[in-house]
Amino acid sequence: MAEGVLRKFAAEKSKELSLTIESAGTHRYHVGSPPDERAQSAALQRGVNISNLRGRLVISEDMERFDYILAMDEDNLEILLEMAGNQYAEKLSLFLDYAPGRSGQNVPDPYYGGPGGFERVLDLVEEAAAGFLAELE
């Protein structure tokens, strides 16, 4: 959902920025699979089509390739910090560090909850995406 929202916001609000936006996971659970249907449905209701996305695993080359690597929660941030080492650690942060008043907070995983969880996550992702793009500008 975060990749889709960031892409949409960048296309609408930050056209002057040249961005490469990709999402990836730290676990192999959904590699090659599309986003959860509940995530797709919730995102589509907000004009964000994520049906073409497929899960992929973070690879070491991502640390070099991207200027920013944003983790959804502290557990994933720790895994990414191990991968990054000292050389790339400054590229890493929590996604919600860019949402006003939410620095240091985790984006909750809505996977085991109901549809309302996906709506809540989208609210948080939209806040963070707007803040992140404003920071880049």
Image (spheres, rainbow, N blue to C red):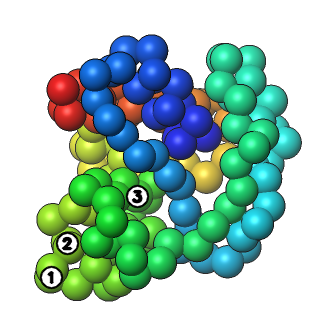
Q: Amino acid at mark 2?
A: Ala
The reply, left or right, for residue 79 in relation to residue 137 is right
Q: Indicate the secondary structure of the residue bearing disc 1.
A: helix
Q: CA distance from mark 1 to mark 2?
A: 5 Å
Q: Which mark sits nearer the N-terminus, 2 or 3?
A: 3
Q: Examine the image and state in which quarter residue 48 appears.
A: top right
Q: What's the residue at 45%, 54% (across, down)?
A: 72
* Residue drawn at 20 percent across, 73 percent down: 88
Q: Give the percent coordinates (x, y) of residue 9.
A: 45, 23
Q: Which residue is mark 3?
A: 71
From the viewer's perspective, is the residue at label 3 or at label 1 nearer?
Answer: 1
Mark number displayed over residue 86 = 1
Which element carries disc 3, helix, strand or loop? Answer: strand
Asked if labels 2 and 1 touch by Cβ distance under 8 angstroms, the answer is yes
SS of the residue at dot 2? Answer: helix
Q: Quadrant of the C terminus?
A: top left
Q: Is the Cβ of the residue at disc 2 closer than 8 Å to that at disc 3?
A: no
Q: Position of residue 110 (x, y in %)?
A: 67, 47
Say which amino acid is labelled 1: Asn
* Cα distance in 3D space between marks 2 and 3: 12 Å
